[in-house]
Amino acid sequence: MKKNPEHKWLNLLKIDPLPKLVEEAPLPVRYHTVQRFLPKEKERLERLHQELQDYKPRLKLIRSQQPDGFWPLQHNFPLEEQQKAYQFLQQIKNMGQLLAWGCSREEPAVQRGIIALLKSQKPDGKFPLMLHHQGMTLWLLVQYGLTGNPFVEKGFRWLIKRQRPDGGWISPTMLPEDASPKTAKSGIWTTLIVCQALNSHSRLRQSEAAERASNFILENYLQPNHTTFFPEPDAWNHLYTEYTDNGMFRGGTLRFVEALIPNRQSHEHPNFKKAIKWLCEQQLPTGLFPAIAGKSQGGDYTVTLRLLTVLNELNKAGTF
């Protein structure tokens, strides 16, 4: 594969991982790699797109969707509120998975899934579960092209009203028993998820709320979280995401830089530069990047694609 002169950011890495992603990665990663980095290879892109239509995991998930847009739960819960909460959690996991498998808003399954998500919203804009679930839901809806949708905008307004004086957010139920919601510092990972949603929104990324959220996570980079949401000190090393109850909120330092990419002022912050440098240093001899820095040896194709996307976006922004 010829080196594209536009990919100057590859100079930051010891090994060019693009050939490995294009030739060896799972089908969805190959598709997204060609789509993002080799868009002129139209025949290859079309072939991969066609192959994705028949990708068995994707077909299985789409076929298991109910007519109302939700997916059936494996267990029934005695309380209706609990049933609705688990139904919603499963919905955002599956909608995230479909996005990763190359599905767009044009797909009938995605359309049904979006309608089901929006029907779960309360009149004041709140979605079920906690603040990080609200942030994830809004981020997903933006990825599916719903910026400006009245229900989505209402959801963002609900979130912004709950921003705390320190610029962050906290779900009180995630605090230790001896902590006071009034005086406790905002949750780092909760704020990171909300910040990513705000910065993904073409208008709100310019808002004071997004600026304050970005500053909060910049100042708390590498700090351990004091809530029950990823309190382990090595949470920043968990670069992977997966479509499980907690796995979809993982991403560590990689998610930190992904959340801040649209906020160009953040690129000059020492902690942002430190994070980019550290990420580049994690490249393995295979050319790939690990799922968990310092632990994984084989490398993770999706983590590698996400990191290359970050470097490409920074290059477009003129950061280097």
Image (cartoon, helix red, strand yellow):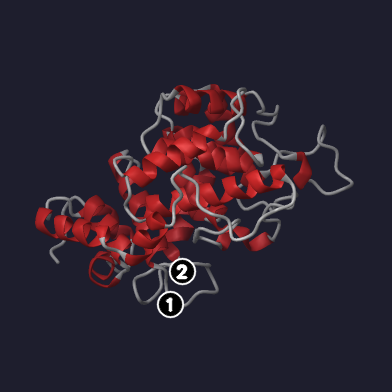
Report the Cα–Cα distance between label 1 and label 2.
7 Å
Q: Going from the N terminus, do you reach mark 1 or mark 2 first?
A: 2
Question: Where residue 143 sits: x, y (%)?
Answer: 39, 40
In this rendering, position of residue 151 left or right of residue 51: right
> Which numbered disc covers residue 290?
2
Locate the C terminus and report the quarter of the image it occupies: top left
Residue 107 position (above or below residue 230): above
**Quarter of image, res 245:** bottom right
Q: Which element carries disc 2, helix, strand or loop?
A: loop
Question: Where residue 77 sits: x, y (%)?
Answer: 70, 53
Question: Where residue 105 sits: x, y (%)?
Answer: 33, 40
In this rendering, position of residue 53 left or right of residue 310: left
Pointer 2 local density, CA inside 10 Å: few below 14, some 14–19, many at least 20: many
Q: Which element carries disc 1, helix, strand or loop?
A: loop
Q: Which residue is mark 1?
A: 298
- The amino acid type, in three-letter code, at marker 1 is Gly
Q: Determine the residue located farthest toward the front in the rendered image.
A: 67
Residue lying at 66% horizontally and 42% vertically, measured from the top left:
129
Question: Where residue 30 sits: x, y (%)?
Answer: 27, 63
Residue lying at 12% horizontally and 51% vertically, measured from the top left:
40
Residue lying at 41% horizontally and 58% vertically, measured from the top left:
61
| Camera sees residue 107 | yes
- The amino acid type, in three-letter code, at marker 2 is Pro
In this rendering, position of residue 130 left or right of residue 53: right
